Amino acid sequence: MIQVLPDHIANQIAAGEVIQRPASAVKELLENAVDAGATSIELIIQDAGKSLVQVVDNGKGMSIEDARLCFARHATSKISSIEDLFHIRTMGFRGEALASIAAVAQVELKTKQATNEAGIFIEVEHSSITREEPIGMATGTSLAMKNLFFNIPARRNFLKSNAAEMRHIVEEFTRVALAFPAIQFSLHANNQQLYQLESGSLKQRIVQLLGNNYASKLVGVQEETDYLTIRGFVGKPDSARKTRGDQYFFVNNRFIKSSYLHHAVMNAFQALLPADHFPLYVLFIDLDPQQVDINVHPTKQEIKFEDEKIVYAFVQAAIRHALAQFSITPTLDFELDASIQQLDSIQQPFTEQTRSAIQEGNLYQHFTQKNQAHRIQPDATQPAKNWKPFQPLGAEYTSTRKEDLLAEPDLGLRSATSFPSESITVIQLLDSYILFSKGSTCTLINQQAAHERVLYEKFIQQLENKKAATQPSLFPTTLSLNPTDASLLEELLADLTAVGFLIQKLNAHDFQIQGIPAGFENGKEESLLEAVLEEYKHFNTALALPLHEKLCRSLAKQQAIKTGIQLSEREMKQLITDLFACKEPHLSPFGVPVFRILQKEDIGQLLLNR
């Protein structure tokens, strides 16, 4: 039997599309504050948003009537006709945000318009107003969302850890703050100030949010056409990192995700970056709202352009033009140093007497003679000292260098067990596979997959026993991260410490790497952690694995020997020994088969079926 759902149930179903986690409410409330014309916005978080998400702004506020009506479904001041949907320039417009929040949380609203003597306080629970009274306050709005999903315990249980939820909140805060650099933003979490962003230019906001290391690494992008305008900044090639996260697209000031446009940016940087590096970009595309559909996804982060190919071409061309104007080779700008302008060589005139004196000199005469530009006349009054004729490198150096090249690398393999004493034959194929025979069988091993399995079980065991060895760094490295990556690294700190890392958080962006696990290569701490973050964010998110297991998988992948690396006989035998001492030697941590056993008849069959 078909029946109409009660309003409170319908509201909760609708809320599931809009409010998926505390960060969803943060996004909606910040966007509403921007639309209200605020010049100062404060975000207050408690318990990663599970207990409190509050946004306070100095915008125009709401009237008493609007304050009562704003919690109704589909109540909005942004559109009044179907045509308005195709001219959207505001952030929020659906009229579902506050209704959805009120359906899954306890809400307190305080708001006042400049024309009113007093504001209004409204308390909402289960989508119904439970309290209403006048209140004295400054012009603006304060909306507090308390106890998210208090009436839907099952939904609350699906929320992640506080660190994970806080990472999503910081991500949403960063996107809105980047889009509106003229607005002052602040973020407080658990009574601590995380960000205080003063109003300024886009470049200043990028540096404020993404780190001071970008201060001298930004290249301006500015192209205007009749169809669209592209503006913003890209990072210089030498500032690219192994982690994605410092990439932002905004269309009409609305953050979007677009792998298609990301491909355009990567094409523009072609041949300027290593294959596994990603450049920073904060790019704004402004075009007629009729040329884009922003209402194709509940979060409004995925949009559809009327002509994607034109936008792709413009983005690629604009970045290439900006990079062409940026000279990779540094130049000297003498105007930057006023003291240079005071030198005698610049201030005094170049007279004919000076010219004659220079032309009579030996250096000038030899330089102007054919094939003599390299010759310098010796000074007879100063005999040469300690000069020796040039000789090719001696055999002693050549021999020493050869020994260095043939030195066996430390693979970090376990040595607790020794290889079986029985005589076997071990050879390496294509610098990628290990083949050994025993009895009537041959075993072919994928050396990278095998080492990944060995290292993965080693790291898991260290986490369980909490006995990982750490080698202190002689010169500690400071790692600067964007807000999202910083939150992720903070979430991983406990497990990173358990496997041997020694990392200290300095501030919201910076971490000091004071030690790394024993056996890891010194000098590559920064790239190692960046690779771990990238692996965790973009390749492991689809797997329902505990956090520590994802970390061990990432570390194993980064540290394992790769295909194409030549191994000595000792290294191959040790790898085989360690592999078959594992609990699960058949598969790598990523599900790749590690080895295959070939019987004598199998080999003969391969030859017959050639």
Image (tube, grey):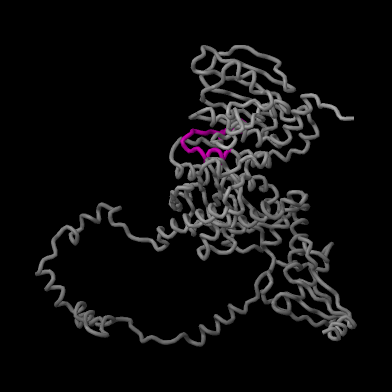
Image coords of residue 167 (percent x, y): 64, 42
In the rendered image, the vertical position of residue 450 relative to residue 599, given as above or below: above
Q: Nearer the viewer, residue 465 or 228?
A: 228
Which segment did they paint magenta? 173-193
Residue 349 occupies which quadrant of the picture? bottom left
* Lateral position of residue 375 relative to residue 522, left or right: left
Magenta stretch: includes residue 252? no
Q: Quadrant of residue 335?
A: bottom left
Question: At which x and y percent is residue 18?
Answer: 69, 35
Of 222 and 119, the residue lying toward us: 222
Q: Residue 322 location, x and y as percent?
A: 44, 56
**Residue at the (63%, 52%) spot, across then down:** 502
Residue 180 part of the magenta-drawn span: yes
Query: Which residue does the image show at 61% across and 55% down from the upper left?
Result: 530
Residue at 48% x, 47% y is 228
Q: Splitting the image into 4 quarters, where does residue 333 fall? A: bottom left
Position of the N terminus by quadrant: top right
